[in-house]
Image: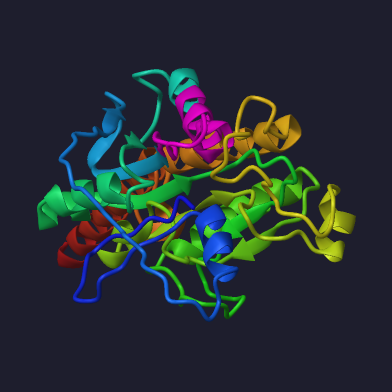
Amino acid sequence: TNVTLTNPGVVPTGGVSQADGTTLATKAGSAITVDMRFHTETRTQRNVIAQTRTGRTNNVVMAGSHLDSVELGAGINDNGSGSAALLETALQLGSQPKIDNAIRFAWWGAEERGLIGSTEYVRSLTFEQQLDIALYLNFDMVGSPNAAYFIYDGDNSDGVGAGPGPYGSAQIEKAFADYFASKGVPTEGTDFSGRSDYGEFIEQGIPAGGLFTGAEGVKTEAQAAKWGGTAGIAYDPCYHSACDNLGNIDRVALGRNAGAIAFVTASYGVSTEDVNGVPPRSKRADVRKSATLMKSAAHVHSHAAVS
């Protein structure tokens, strides 16, 4: 149920409910007719984009969370948790924070329909506008009730599934890992599986990273010993279900992740030097001052030599 099918191809594809599937299974060996119907309709969904008035606009730090949910439930963890944490970060920063790099916040539409909002946004940008984005941070489900503390595996050190993200993704992973380590919270990597809004950013070579507390995956004994919670059940037993309501949140996990989101996002607003070599304004000023002094010294030395 609630399977998302995108990019229609040449093979006809359909789905049935679990109840209908169970009924069909009891008819094994019998001739049966299945009448499958579909309809298409066009709907408009919107992305919400906001950017600080301060900071350079050709080295933008971008952070996003999807705003929609599946039709079945309220979507409080998926993805009210990420959207709310990102909104609070934006509110606390304000419109004119003292930062070197502008921070652009995005709340994506139509993620559950196949990452449509974020994909269309990135594709709508010119090549130069894509180059203006220094990095992208993604927050999709950060308050799962049986929470894990996953960070997207930017350097592919886990060797699972997809390879590493674009250069700079490893440094983003380390920034989050260092934050959690400073709080005494152990973390694990999670693969860039293509299931959230970082996909098109990575496709266009933009460094990416982010946080995830788990969906339908099952928590292991080792993870339960490390993080608490219950082994043998999903990180979010209400994933894509009607019970994803206000009771479906681990508030401790949400608080920890919200802190990490705010700290790392704001830190990159000050400097992205470890990701793409662009230092903060104060450091650039020191470099320019040093270069000026060296130039002056060289001039004095040259003048003395001529004299």
Give the residue at x 23% y 64%. 7
Residue most toward the front?
30
Tell me the residue at 46%/75% (across/down): 162
Q: Position of residue 49 (x, y in %)?
A: 27, 31
Taking the magenta stretch, the answer to whether it contains residue 102 is no
Q: Is residue 197 left or right of residue 292?
A: right
Image: 63 above or below 89: below
| x and y, in percent, of residue 221 in the image | 86, 63
Q: Report whether residue 293 is seen.
A: no
| 261 displayed left or right of 293 | right
Q: Is 87 in front, or is 76?
A: 76
Magenta residues span: 66-88
Residue 246 placement (x, y as % from top left): 64, 24
Q: Residue at x 40, y 41 (%)?
A: 63
Expressed as whole percent of the image width and height from the top left, the position of residue 19 reads 56, 54
- Residue 82 included in the magenta stretch of the image: yes
